[in-house]
Image: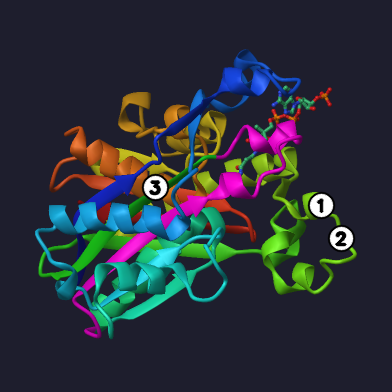
Amino acid sequence: MFSRISGTGSFFPPDVMTNHDFEKFLETSDEWIITRTGIRERRIAKNHSCSDMGYEAGLKALEMAEMKPEDLDGIIFATFTPDTTMPSCACRVQSLLGIPGTFAFDIAAACTGFLYACNVADSMIKSGSAKNILVIGAEKITATVDWSDRSTCILFGDGAGAAVLSASDKPGIRSVSVHADGDHADLLALPCLGTEYLAKRNELDIEAGMIKMSGNEVFKIAVRAMAEVASRAVEMSGLSYDDIDFLIPHQANLRIIDATAKRLNLAQERVIINLDRYGNTSAATIPTALDGAVREGRIKRGMNIASAAFGGGLTWGGMVFTF
Ligand code: UT7
């Protein structure tokens, strides 16, 4: 028994913020942002919550899988920017889909969240406890950025991606390798959504609780970890590097993506990138990039995909699957 991606979907809110928009209130430039990150524009969710976006992406994934919500056994929602700590975004999506009784829970593994969620869904399907699981990666990060911090606010965007994982007799998910190192927790953090912060909210300045990143240090660790975990996932999958048709990396920085592709010996045209249009959407980068490439006809059934992510926690992971 294997688990296989039977459908994908994505959703981006309509409001676009370009690099030039930042030039109006920050000491930055379109040229700096493109050269240092590869990002040209990102989407801002003005009228959608994180769960709204996840729901929209989920509907599209169900449609591609030719399934109704009732066919699902459960929902796993990866995010670090949930609408509320409780209830989970997964429970909100379950209610919108009208399928009470199925399991529903969130996973907090930041930018690696989608791969962690796929790992859990794959294990549940392989163990026989579920047949169809909706896995969502969605973020509303722009609600958490400090707009005066030019080193972080230019990086992030909002959006959602989804995949339905279904039991199959043909190989789908071939390997998943997920990791974390809590010793570096302070390098990338969002204190203001946690109880530690809220307990002190009267003494603290809310701006201090916004997302903070030591970009340069995270960059150095991310370059190494993404490349290593991507190659580990390929080795665990039983496939060779030559069998990999496409790399779908977490979209944080074009320079990190290039280093990961180099490690897998993949030419630029074999790498799926949506960073230029959507920025870093954390848990949503991999499922949105996958869905975009499937709908453009670049990724076809039977192709082998390697994926890798790195994010706050610190967390990182790799996955190889046959689409
Ligand atoms: O998704 C989770 C994982 N996240 C990542 O993997 C992100 C990893 N980090 C990065 O992508 C990069 O470190 C950044 C894009 C965040 C920053 O790029 P960098 O090349 O590492 O720049 P830096 O932090 O070393 O800063 C270089 C200079 C500094 O100025 P000084 O001190 O040299 O005068 C910054 O103040 O660039 C300055 N700077 C900016 N200048 C114009 C930082 N942000 C900006 C900006 N516009 N937006």
Q: Is residue 129 left or right of residue 52?
A: left
The amino acid type, in three-letter code, at marker 2 is: Leu
Inspect this view and state whether residue 240 appears: no
**Mark 1 or 3, which is nearer the eye?**
1
Q: Amino acid at mark 3?
A: Ile
The label on residue 208 is 1
- The circle drawn on residue 204 is 2
Please say if 45 is above or below 87: above
Whether the magenta-drawn stretch holds residue 148 is answered as yes
Give how far apart the Cα atoms at labels 2 and 1 are: 7 Å
Question: In the image, is the residue at mark 3 within 8 Å of ligand 1 by its beta carbon?
Answer: no
Report the Cα–Cα distance between label 1 and label 3: 29 Å
Residue 286's disc number: 3
Q: Is residue 215 visible?
A: yes
Closer-to-camera residue (162/318)? 162
Taking the image as four quarters, which one is ligand 1 found in? Answer: top right
Q: Residues within 10 Å of mark 1 (few under 14, many from 20)?
A: few
* Few, some or many residues within 10 Å of mark 2 (<14, 14–19, 20+): few
Q: Residue furthest top?
A: 31
- Residue sitting at x 68%, y 38%: 152
Residue at 31%, 47% (x, y): give it.
10
- In this picture, which residue range is highlighted in magenta? 128-156
Whether residues under marks 2 and 1 lie with C-beta atoms below 8 angstroms apart, the answer is yes
What separation in Å lies between label 3 and label 2 (alpha carbons)?
Answer: 35 Å
Which quadrant of the structure image shows residue 320?
bottom left
Q: CB at mark 1 closer than 8 A to ligand 1?
A: no
Q: Residues within 10 Å of mark 3 (few under 14, many from 20)?
A: many
Q: Amino acid at mark 1?
A: Ala
x, y percent for residue 231:
43, 49
Q: Earlier in the sequence, mark 3 or mark 2?
A: 2
